[in-house]
């Protein structure tokens, strides 16, 4: 029977930093999967969090941590004494339910998450950097700025002993590409969609462009514009697991800000991803999304209900985009209104494209039909 070793609860004062240190330590080992409930820790709803590691018959000492058996961990979780991230829970249940090593979800093989502190939008504080593969490692979205975070990523790459490593960027935003140049200067190739490559040419030299349908080390490239031009998702061919960049997030909201963002494209990209029936989605911010279809449906429904509210507002009177925010985003804190205005303009641009709204350069009005 494969051994399943899980470190016990972290010290209450350890917080997110302890979780990150643990990830860094663990990434130096030969692991099938590393997963952490960083979100639970970040939100501080309870006093303890847990890091889990599934190893192939490997057990090793971790200073400051006790080992806990898988069954005991699951019991603590069911009693509400511990928090577990969804991927930890899935992995635990699968591993305990069978004596076969294969019972670990297939997508855990060669997929590691390293949440890195990044210049992203609250409430998110980190960008998940995914480390894919074995002999050649794909480093997806190295968006950290701080030196200690960059060192952590470098140590993680070194610890996995890849023969080669390459960077893949899902899109152009700073919290995804900030350390790409630093890695390129260390000799790593950089991959991105052609459109993204053109947009970041001044910042990062993309050495090879990716187009829709291309396959890179077992991952299919899916062009999914909407949040940003030249945005891509990566679909693990063997399992269908999907890395979605910023198409969706399990922490925070995806911002659609024109002209980079396009609401029509965004909804189209979501529908395309929905049709792929991914068993799990790994977003750039927050833990994995397992209830894939309902999450996508809820995202689409939320956007469309906003669109109806916006349409109703401009049907009553001619309004600027900021006027619309004041009337429609009453449930959103005022300091987020500038971001909301981007979304409003994205919705209005889509409605103009569809012939449902007109714009005279100052005000938007609904076009009467019938
Ligand atoms: Zn982004």
Image: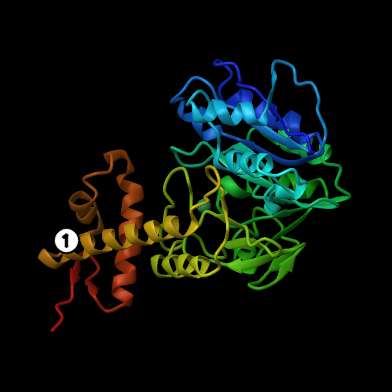
Residue at far left of view? 316
Task: Answer with left or right where residue 134 lies relative to residue 203.
Answer: right
Residue plotted at (52% across, 50% down): 289
Q: Determine which residue is flagged by label 1.
A: 313
- The kind of secondary structure element at disc 1 is helix
Would you place residue 340 above or below residue 240 in this image? above
Task: Answer with left or right where residue 222 lies relative to residue 108.
Answer: left
Report whether residue 148 is seen: no
Residue at far right of view? 163
Task: Answer with left or right where residue 60 lies relative to residue 41.
Answer: right
Residue plotted at (64% across, 30% down): 71
Residue 99 point in image, percent of width and height:
74, 43
Would you place residue 276 above or below residue 53 in this image? below
Residue plotted at (65% across, 60% down): 201
Would you place residue 126 above or below residue 343 in this image? above
Q: Nearer the viewer, residue 89 or 275?
A: 89
Quadrant position of the N terminus in the picture: top right
Residue 222 point in image, percent of width and height:
60, 67
Quadrant position of the C terminus in the picture: bottom left
């Amino acid at each position: 029977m494969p051994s399943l070793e899980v470190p016990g609860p972290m010290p209450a004062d350890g917080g997110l930093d302890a979780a990150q240190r643990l990830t860094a330590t663990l990434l130096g080992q030969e692991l099938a999967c590393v997963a952490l409930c960083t979100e639970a820790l970040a939100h501080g709803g309870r006093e303890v969090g847990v890091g889990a590691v599934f190893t192939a018959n490997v057990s090793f000492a971790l200073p400051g941590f006790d080992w806990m058996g898988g069954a005991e961990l699951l019991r603590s979780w069911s009693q509400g004494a511990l928090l577990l991230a969804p991927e930890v829970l899935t992995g635990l249940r699968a591993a305990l339910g069978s004596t076969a090593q294969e019972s670990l979800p297939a997508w855990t093989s060669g997929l590691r998450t390293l949440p890195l502190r990044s210049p992203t939008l609250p409430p998110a504080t980190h960008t998940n950097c995914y480390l894919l593969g074995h002999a050649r490692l794909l480093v997806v979205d190295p968006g950290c700025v701080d030196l200690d975070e960059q060192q952590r990523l470098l140590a993680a790459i070194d610890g996995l002993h890849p023969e080669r490593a390459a960077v893949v960027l899902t899109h152009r935003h700073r919290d995804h590409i900030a350390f790409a140049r630093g890695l390129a200067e260390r000799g790593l190739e950089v991959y991105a969609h052609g459109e993204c490559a053109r947009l970041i040419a001044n910042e990062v030299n993309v050495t090879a462009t990716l187009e829709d349908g291309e396959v890179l080390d077992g991952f299919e490239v899916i062009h999914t514009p909407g949040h940003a031009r030249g945005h891509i998702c990566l679909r693990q061919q063997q399992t269908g697991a999907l890395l979605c960049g910023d198409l969706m997030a399990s922490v925070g909201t995806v911002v659609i800000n024109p002209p980079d963002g396009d609401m029509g494209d965004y909804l189209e990209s979501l529908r395309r991803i929905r049709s792929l029936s991914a068993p799990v989605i790994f977003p750039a911010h927050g833990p994995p999304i397992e209830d894939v279809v309902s999450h996508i449906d809820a995202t689409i429904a939320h956007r469309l209900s906003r669109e109806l509210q916006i349409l109703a507002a401009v049907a009553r009177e001619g309004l600027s985009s900021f006027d619309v925010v004041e009337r429609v985003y009453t449930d959103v804190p005022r300091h987020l209104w500038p971001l909301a205005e981007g979304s409003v303009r994205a919705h209005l641009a889509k409605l103009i494209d569809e012939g449902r709204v007109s714009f005279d350069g100052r005000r938007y009005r609904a076009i009467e039909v019938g």
